[in-house]
Amino acid sequence: GLCPDWETWDARPPVDNAREAMQQADDWLGVPQVIAPEEIVDPNVDEHSVMTYLAQFPKAKLKPGAPLRPKLNPKKARAFGPGVEAMGNMVMKPAAFTVETISAGQGEVLVFVEDPAGHKEEAKVSPVKDKNQTYSVVYTPKVVGPHKVTVLFAGQHINKSPFEVSVAKPQADASKVTARGPGLELNGVIAGKPTYFDIHTAGAGMGDVHVTITDPRGRSDTVDVELEDRGESVFRCAYRAVLEGAHSVAVSYGGTAIPRSPFPVNVAQALSPSTCVRLKGAGGMPGLRVNETASRHVCVKRPSPPHPTEPNKSNDIPVSVKPWLGPTRSCEYMPSVQGKHVVSVTWAGQHIPRSPFEVEVGPPAGEQKVRAWGPGLRSGLVDHPAHFVVEAIGDDIGTLGFSIEGPSQARIECQDCGDGSCDVVYWPGEAGDYAVHVVCDDQDIKHSPFMAEIVETGGACSPAQVKVFGPGLESGKVVVGKPIEFTVDARAGGRAP
């Protein structure tokens, strides 16, 4: 019709409403205004004049081009969904709802959200394009408190609009919080040394971060904790433990413990690198070659964790640091270029004795003419023979040589077996680490020097009394792919160190 929404007009300006309707009738129906708008709204109007005016409408015909509009009924549009519920919406969490207009006619949907301070923003409205003429609406409240959600259809409020929506502080979800850093490692924290760890709360809602550190005596007031908000949902916790021993680091979010909390932390005594730390291994000795793994072992008087690093000064080399094995931690690196390398090993931020070490890395080993194997290349006993075998690979092996570096001079004997191999034995006189060099034409063979750990027997060990026998040691009885046995009888050998 020409005025399809007349039912929703504001009745307070009756003359204006009558003037608009009568003008539309005059323009498009050819009904002359035989009575003035001011008269037709007057309660005391002459009824005969009104009937004369209204009698023209049944015979009136609509002119071409009339601006007909479908009848609108905004009150028949409805909104539903979490975004218009009185409770349940949270700060910074998208709130969605749906507006259905199938019974309301044709019109534009607009949504405005007003926060407690009176700030008003237009929400995003997206047509779904379904048979019910629905629209999807999403807004994100930014503050806590009562909000007003106004939904307009064709410029008018739909049913129940505006909606009163309460926005609450989001509940903290501690299960989505993570914490990591050196201050949470089981080993690595030194008494009196500052350390830290970071707490990540992204996606966990809003909550308070709380950290409590309990010392070995069960007290939680001996370690000062400093929390710093670093932005982007990250908090840094810095602390300095006073006592050595087992500590417990409890991290909570919104009053609930996060996963893995409390974290056990062993705080080590602050030891002097010059007196309590030593280095052993082939990773700093001559003979190291490109693309060969170099091993070093950091030894301390007690299993307290250093952080050794072994970089080249101009180009850091990755170092693999293995878990503690007693008071020793093994580190491995593989140089990829030839030349001088610098190996730095620090304990609690200080260089250990002789660090940094200069290591000359030679060219790749290339094709090998000789290989060596046997127990004497790995371990041995003081004043007992340590054996190993050197075996030729091919015919032209060149000139062989052997040397032993260690706490004492070790006598070396070599016996040619006549089959391209030789038995080598040496007698270490003191306990410690011995570097066994096997050279061919004055060059260390692959994996040389071999590091052998020599220990004291304490008089309770006698390897010469150990008996070994069985078919697995007899010539002609061993078949490829078939299991075979032999026996080691160590009953008379005493207790091994």
Image (cartoon, rainbow, N blue to C red):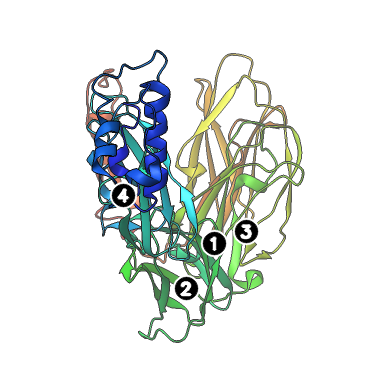
Q: CA distance from mark 3 to mark 2?
A: 33 Å
Q: CA distance from mark 1 to mark 4?
A: 63 Å
Residue type at the position of mark 2: Val
Q: CA distance from mark 2 to mark 4?
A: 51 Å
Q: Earlier in the sequence, mark 2 or mark 1?
A: 2
Identify the secondary structure beneath mark 1: strand
Residue placed under numbered mark 2 in the picture: 267
Residue placed under numbered mark 3 in the picture: 407
Residue type at the position of mark 1: Cys
Q: Which mark is residue 83?
A: 4
Q: Callout 3: few (<14), some (14-19), or many (20+) C-alpha neighbours within 10 Å?
A: some
Q: Is residue 337 left or right of residue 265?
A: right
Identify the secondary structure beneath mark 4: helix
Which of labels 3 and 4 is toward the front?
A: 4
Q: CA distance from mark 1 to mark 3?
A: 17 Å
Which of labels 3 and 2 is toward the front?
A: 2
Q: CA distance from mark 3 to mark 4?
A: 79 Å
Which of labels 2 and 4 is toward the front?
A: 4
Residue placed under numbered mark 1 in the picture: 299
Vertical comparison of 91 with 41: above or below = below
Identify the secondary structure beneath mark 2: strand
* Quarter in which the N terminus is drawn: top left
Pointers 2 and 1 in contact (CB under 8 A)? no
Residue type at the position of mark 3: Pro
